[in-house]
Image (spheres, rainbow, N blue to C red):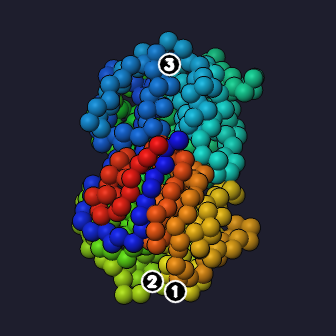
Amino acid sequence: MKYFKILGGAKLSGEIKISGAKNASLPIIASTLLGKSDITLTNVPEVVDIYTLLELLEDMGSTFSFKDNMVTINNNIKTTKAKYDIVKKLRASILVLGPLLGRYRKCQVSFPGGCAIGQRPVDLHLSALEKMGANFIINDGYIDATAPNGLKGAKIVFDKITVGGSENLIMASSMAKGTTILSNVAIEPEVVQLCQFIRDAGVDIEGIGSNELKIVGTEGEPLEYKECKIISDRIEAGTYLCAAGITNSTIKLNNINHNLLSMVLAKLEEVGFSFTTDEDSIVIHKAEQLKSVDISTSEFPGFPTDMQAQFMSLLTQCEGTSAIEERLFENRFMHVPELNRMGANISLNGRVAKISGPKKLSPANVMASDLRASSALVLASLVASGASKVDRIYHLDRGYENFEKKLKNLGAKIIRKG
């Protein structure tokens, strides 16, 4: 099994380019099921999760080419069954449910897999689609969905904010008959770009960027998509900012708008770092002292749950006691025992982790449990006084493009082996 060998202690310097956002690419790729011609997307990261979703579309009949971060997809669906063998590898596979049901009025979608970070039930997706006239039968691990008369516009209020549920309903509503009003919608930048992509294809969408959307469907008429450049990956950028933070280094990130990272930058400023920003770059400057902070994860524009693990590694090097409250997922502290094995002092009480520092970390063999936990263990290894081994790096390959190459370009001593 492949792993990273990391020799800690090196300072980082230089600059790197941030890739396109995986979490923006996935729903937009799923939405190509609504299109009627070749659709081109640029700035798409070449990571495993993207290839998995493209494999799923290909299995259903679409064709694609993917080179130099550009994907061209031709939607030529021959089956509306999303098979378990592919879906089990990617949680975001559930995003084909809305567009398949909206356009083709029937589909079979296996319950999804993905990172084991806690329950992420699809009941919010299903209950909302039922209000639009869909019927569901759960059979042999599949969601068997039908809307024989097509989906109809409805007023839907999500019981809680759900990014995937919002994306599925936005895509489904674009194919419905009549007007759909979606309330308590997620406002993550990735959701906003999906709305813009569909709007630019001719769908009337009001309220983009707010928590209420008004969508006038096309009654099943396929969309004429325009070429789309995927926004930059704010979580990848945040990860490299934490890499600079934990090593107290100055680096520059290109191809990233600082407005995507407002809360992350605010917390890094509390730690002691300063920044120079423009529309397309961020420079993080080393701090005189690293101070403890308290964090609670929440939906955008709050502190992202996908940055919690990386920040925890950074906080092991901060003076005092920090607290992280994980409010979105109940099982997202699986990296804590591994960090403690490296010498961190982290205690758990339910959904709250307390991190006492600064602690001198020691090299160890550690095992990643999910995508963001993987990056957190790599960051901790950057300051461990010796050689560490981070196993199960296939998690990292799911969501980070050229991860070790970019770290090497910044001066990290990291090698992929196995």
With respect to residue 222, does 201 lie above or below? below
Whole-percent x, y for residue 408 in the image: 31, 57
Q: For residue 318, say whether it is visible.
A: yes
**Tags 1 and 2 in contact by the CB under 8 Å rule?**
yes
Q: Earlier in the sequence, mark 2 or mark 3?
A: 3
Frontmost of labels 1 and 3 is 1
Q: Residue at x 68, y 51 (%)?
A: 118
Check disc 1 and give the amino acid type: Glu
Which residue is identified by label 2? 290
Check disc 3 and give the amino acid type: Asp
- Local packing at callout 2 (Cα closer than 10 Å; few below 14, some 14-19, many 20+) is many
Q: Quadrant of residue 364?
A: bottom right
Numbered mark located on residue 59 in the image: 3
Whole-percent x, y for residue 230 in the image: 34, 44
With respect to residue 114, does 5 lie above or below? below
Frontmost of labels 2 and 3 is 2
State the separation of the CA atoms marked 1 and 3. Answer: 52 Å
Whole-percent x, y for residue 81 in the image: 59, 19
In this rendering, position of residue 273 left or right of residue 186: left
Q: Earlier in the sequence, mark 1 or mark 2?
A: 2
**Which secondary structure, mark 1?**
loop
Which residue is identified by label 1? 319
In this rendering, position of residue 105 left or right of residue 63: right
Q: Residue at x 41, y 83 (%)?
A: 272
Which of these two is toward me, 357 or 83? 357
- Local packing at callout 1 (Cα closer than 10 Å; few below 14, some 14-19, many 20+) is some
The image shows a total of numbered marks equal to: 3
Check disc 2 and give the amino acid type: Leu
Which of these two is toward me, 64 or 168? 64
State the separation of the CA atoms marked 2 and 3. Answer: 50 Å
